Image: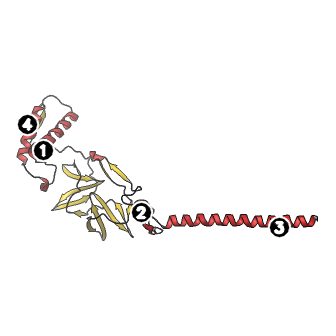
Amino acid sequence: MMNLFQKKGSAARGWMSVLLTGIVLLCWSTAAESADRGVRHGSGGKSYRNAPASAQRAVPGGSHSREYRDTRYHHNRSYPVHGQSYRKAPRHSHHVHHGGRHYYYSRGVWYRPYGAYFSVVIPPPGLYVSFLPPYYTTVWAGGVPYYYANEVYYTHRGAGYVVVPPPKDEASQVPPPADDLFIYPRLNQSEQQQADDRYECHQWAVEQTGFDPTQPPEAQTKGTQADYLRAMSACLDGRGYTVK
């Protein structure tokens, strides 16, 4: 009788072991299948197994698309993070071929093909474009105007613009004094006050005349340099400067 109970107990333990093993295998199989689906498929069911990690996250218009705000020189514009990838270049982007590579340019953002994706990049110096981004900031260094947007500097060349390295000299948003103007502070204004007054008078003169010496020639819609200089002189004189 004792042997009979021992045999039944042994058989029960055997069936229990088999049952537990089956449950574990079923759970592992379900989890693996779910993880495999998550790796291989994104929105729309397309495969991302061989895509860069950034391309999996950066879906245009999606919740994972990342941007940063460029505040240098008070530019204050938002752009996609560099290195982020997309399935397509933006519609109506401008195609540029440079150094044996293809680039796509849209609203101050540069894209370069990376396999089946387009990554946000900083363009190399020497790349030529026919127009500036819709939003840019003019800065001055060594008496030369640079046009800045999205960590990229451009200078005027021929009928267009070329990407250049950052200026070696310290850049400033205040334009250099015009060659035709000698400005003397009658009230012993500090250097900072002089810079502020020059910049504010520059802005006022541009508003009054429509001429802006910091902008490329084709951006001038009306007014002349002479008009601008007269307005600039009047503004500075009213702030306590002798202008000749």
Query: Which one is closest to the eye, mark 4 or mark 2?
Result: 2
Residue 206: which numbered mark, if any?
1
Find residue 119 and report its horizontal and vertical position in percent.
Answer: 36, 63
Q: Is residue 86 above or below residue 142?
A: below
Find residue 116 and report its horizontal and vertical position in percent.
Answer: 39, 70
The amino acid pointed to by label 1 is Val
Figure label count: 4
| Quarter residue 182 falls in | top left
Instruction: Please give the name of the residue rendered at 13% of the width and 40% of the height, measured from the top-left corner.
Output: 204
Q: Is residue 138 rendered to the left or right of residue 184?
A: right
Residue on which disc 2 sits: 55
Query: Which one is closest to the eye, mark 1 or mark 3?
Result: 3
User: In this view of the protein, which residue sits in the foreground, 179 or 28?
Assistant: 28
Callout 4–callout 2 Cβ contact below 8 Å: no
Find residue 191 and report its horizontal and vertical position in percent.
Answer: 21, 34
Find residue 193 and report its horizontal and vertical position in percent.
Answer: 20, 33
The amino acid pointed to by label 2 is Ala
Q: Is residue 28 rendered to the left or right of residue 45?
A: right
The amino acid pointed to by label 4 is Ala
Q: Secondary structure at mark 3?
A: helix
> Quarter of the image containing the N terminus?
bottom right
For the residues marked 1 and 4, what is the alpha-carbon distance in whole angstroms?
13 Å
Instruction: Please give the name of the residue rendered at 20% of the width and 43% of the height, measured from the top-left corner.
Output: 174
Residue 11: which numbered mark, if any?
3
Query: Which one is closest to the eye, mark 1 or mark 4?
Result: 1
Nearer the N terminus, badge 3 or badge 4? 3
> Quarter of the image containing the C terminus?
top left
Residue 234: which numbered mark, if any?
4
Nearer the N terminus, badge 1 or badge 4? 1
